[in-house]
Image: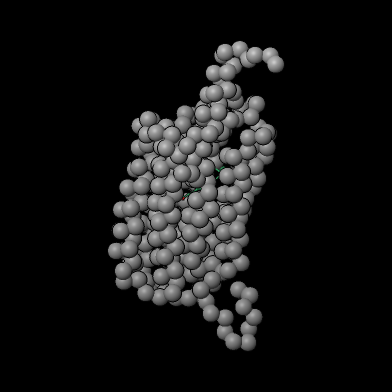
Amino acid sequence: MIAAPLADVATVVQFETALQMTQSEAFDFIHSDSLLASSLWTNVALAGVSILLFVYMGRNIEGTRAQLIWVATLLVPLVSLSSYLGLVSGLTVGFLEMPAGHALAGEGGVFSPWGRYLTWALSTPMILTALGLLAGTDRAKLFTAITMDVGMCVTGLAAALTTGSYLLRWVFYALSCAFFVAVLYVLLVEWPADAAAAGTAEIFNTLKTLTVVLWLGYPILWALGSEGFAVLGVGVTSWGYSGLDILAKYVFAFLLLRWVAANQNVVGRETGATEQPSSGTPADD
Ligand code: RET
């Protein structure tokens, strides 16, 4: 057996400790970086405050459609609180050795907050459900938006976790973008017309613009961040997602709930997805 040079042994040890980090070591890693830790704790706090505020704001909301919007909206900070607690505790983060071709290949384990991508598969469908119900859309379009969105999140997770091939990381990224295009189509083309018919065009268009602009920031950040081209460091990338989350989740949800609470007469009308099919006609809305 040929003895490995000392430097190599040190590198391997560095790799192994990074890749086999325990949760408490991951916890210590996160808390040794004040930028990273603050990006996560800020969202834990804001999600908690949002939950209390949204419960209060929805206390008098009546009618199936308005209540569905309220519950979907409330689930956004509820999922977010769980997500950020998972990240900050070290439970849903990992340290991945990047494949050859990646800017950080050979530099030890790269911090991967994979729990983010996983929980987006729960939170973003809630955002779309609330928006779809606000627009008074039908079940086919709601189903399309949600399934495409889940496809986007799961393939985004695959892009982050693929370490066997640098090319395949970007193939998953491209697939995720393709799903995203379908979501954007529903948001930008289908639902505005539905919202106009339902009398919710003004608020819908405000929230649609907010959503589209902010959501476009996520793939850009992924590409620039430590898991993509690594132009940005771990702490800055994490603050990028946290900042986008603050606007795309809490601010979005607050604006939506405030409008719904004040316009229950408009939202009270059953449309599209919440409409009961009248007897004798097929339920094909
Ligand atoms: C990824 C990388 C792969 C390509 C694309 C992405 C899009 C992510 C988006 C996330 C939105 C998240 C929100 C979370 C709120 O809880 C997965 C970053 C297209 C659009 C709004």
Where's residue 94, x and y in %?
Answer: 51, 38
Residue 56 position by quadrant? bottom left
Q: Identify the image quadrant of the C terminus.
A: bottom right
Q: Identify the image quadrant of the N terminus.
A: top right
Residue 228 position by quadrant? top right
Where's residue 109, x and y in %?
Answer: 54, 29
In this image, 214 relative to 148: left or right? left
Residue at 54% in and 72% down: 272
Camera-nearest residue between 141 and 108 = 108
Where's residue 185, x and y in %?
Answer: 59, 54
Observer able to see residue 285: yes
Residue at 40% in and 75% down: 63
Residue at 57% in and 81% down: 277
Can you name the residue that lies furthest to the front here?
1
Where's residue 227, x and y in %?
Answer: 55, 34
In this image, 79 relative to 228: left or right? left
- 18 shown above or below 271: above
- 204 shown above or below 14: below
Observer able to see residue 201: no
